[in-house]
Amino acid sequence: MQLQNTLNNINISEAFISFQGEGKYIGARQLFIRFSGCDVNCQGCDTDYSSKESFIFFDKIYYNPVNIFQFVEDIKGYDIFNEIHSISFTGGEPLLSLEAIKFMISSFGKKTKYFLETSGYHLDILKEIYDLLDIVSIDIKLKSTFGVDDNIYALKNAYFIEKNKSYFKLIVDNKIEQFEIANVVDLLKSKGFDEIYLHTKNNLVEFKLLSDIMKIFYGSGINCFFVPQMHKLVGIR
Ligand code: SF4
């Protein structure tokens, strides 16, 4: 999956209005725009970010690669901005569709807020649009949970990430290692973050494990909030 650096090859997997199901803004009513494609290859990925031939939004069918100009004009016409908290650019990895995100932000201007959910790997791209975004949700990926190299060192060195517009999500399962928690604590403290949002993979909860992890965060001066993936619990997308 390559960075889409033109507006002619943008693939959107789905677009819909729903409630944010994870993290700090859980429950916020958002317009979700899910871009196709991700190059992280997490084991047990639960997101369908595959390229689709088409998607439906407000009863209209859009074929991929989408005519982004028409899509944006249509969204403007639906006049939904005073009925949502923000637009959520999600994926897959939405940063791979950088030009589409920039175009939408420049088209909609101050009509809404811009929320981006990223895997936390394409930090050079994130840096390029960080100032345009209002809220950035960043995953901390652990090898024990997803079988990929973690992104902790890279996040630590991404000095542009500030707590006034960003928060970190940590997804764990029962294979988590003690040293990984210590590394996450170190990351947060080095960046001056004092909170983290904890999810469990596939919403499988081992109470004692969660409790033990949270104790470590609180003992390190970090507020840790356990947040089940609400959209899955209530059966919405
Ligand atoms: S970063 Fe997210 S969308 Fe991409 S493979 Fe991992 S879990 Fe799936």
Image (tube, rainbow, N blue to C red):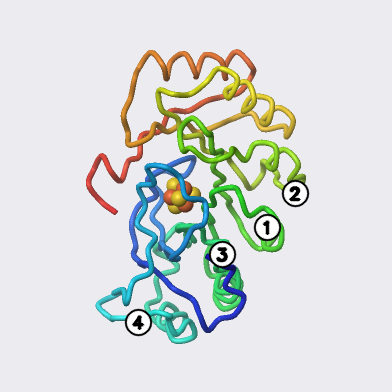
Classify mark 1: residues with Cα within 10 Å, few (<14), some (14-19) or many (20+).
some
User: Mark 1 or 2 closer to N-term?
Assistant: 1
Q: Nearer the viewer, mark 1 or mark 3?
A: 3
Disc 3 is placed on an element classified as helix
Along the viewing direction, whichever of 58 and 99 lies nearer the viewer: 99
The quadrant holding residue 64 is bottom left
User: Mark 4 or 2 closer to N-term?
Assistant: 4
**Residue 63: assigned label:** 4
Distance from the alpha carbon under mark 1 to that under mark 3: 14 Å
Q: Assess mark 1: CB under 8 A from ligand 1?
A: no
Distance from the alpha carbon under mark 2 to that under mark 3: 19 Å
Q: Nearer the viewer, mark 4 or mark 2?
A: 4
Q: Residue 135 in the image: x percent, y percent?
A: 58, 52
The residue identified by callout 2 is 160
User: Mark 3 or 4 closer to N-term?
Assistant: 4
Residue at the image position 33 percent from the left and 25 percent from the top: 205
Distance from the alpha carbon under mark 4 to that under mark 1: 29 Å
Q: Nearer the viewer, mark 2 or mark 3?
A: 3
The residue identified by callout 1 is 130
The residue identified by callout 3 is 96
Q: Nearer the viewer, mark 4 or mark 1?
A: 4
